[in-house]
Image (spheres, rainbow, N blue to C red):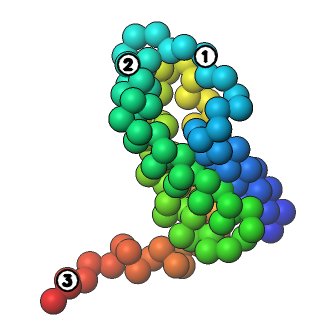
Amino acid sequence: MKIIVLIARILMGAVFLVFGLNGFFHFMPAPPLPGLAGEFTHSLIASGYVYLVSGVQVIGGFLLLTNQFVPLALVLLGPVIVNIIVFHLSMQPSGIAPGLVMLVLWLVLAYRCRTLFLPFLRNQRAE
């Protein structure tokens, strides 16, 4: 299990670091997306929102690659993965495979850190 977790952490960290940096430096050209997917992507770029998402990806990927604050990295990258999945389910189903791979890797790492996430599932009221 340790080898699987190590591979998952390094692979997921590398993917998010590289694609997060690409959001800033554009070293991998993105093909034009047709229809609603293209409009959505254009909106993210035109508004500058893509820089926030890319920054979260860079931070999360870096934390995973350095094996520091892994639960924090998972908390940061979880919403990004959900948005990747929802984007592909609703606008571009043909490209969902990489998002599903990231989801599986996230689940492997989250399972490894499950005891740290259990307090979030307790019903406690803040007073």
Badge 2 is on which residue? 39
Badge 1 is on which residue? 31
Quadrant where the image shows the C terminus: bottom left
Residue at left offset 80%, top offset 68%: 2
> Between disc 1 and disc 2, whose residue precedes?
1
What is the spatial separation of the Cα atoms under label 3 and label 1, in whole angstroms?
48 Å
42 versus 75 height, above or below = above
Return the x and y of residue 104 as percentages of the image width and height.
62, 48
Kind of residue at badge 3: Arg
Return the x and y of residue 51 as percentages of the image width and height.
48, 44
Residue at left offset 65%, top offset 56%: 61
Q: Which numbered dot is residue 125?
A: 3
Crowdedness near tag 3: few (<14), some (14–19) or many (≥20) residues, C-alpha within 10 Å = few
62 versus 93 height, above or below = below
User: Element at badge 3?
Assistant: loop
Dot 3 and dot 2 residues touching (CB under 8 Å): no
User: Element at badge 1?
Assistant: loop
Give whichever of 56, 126 is nearer the camera: 56
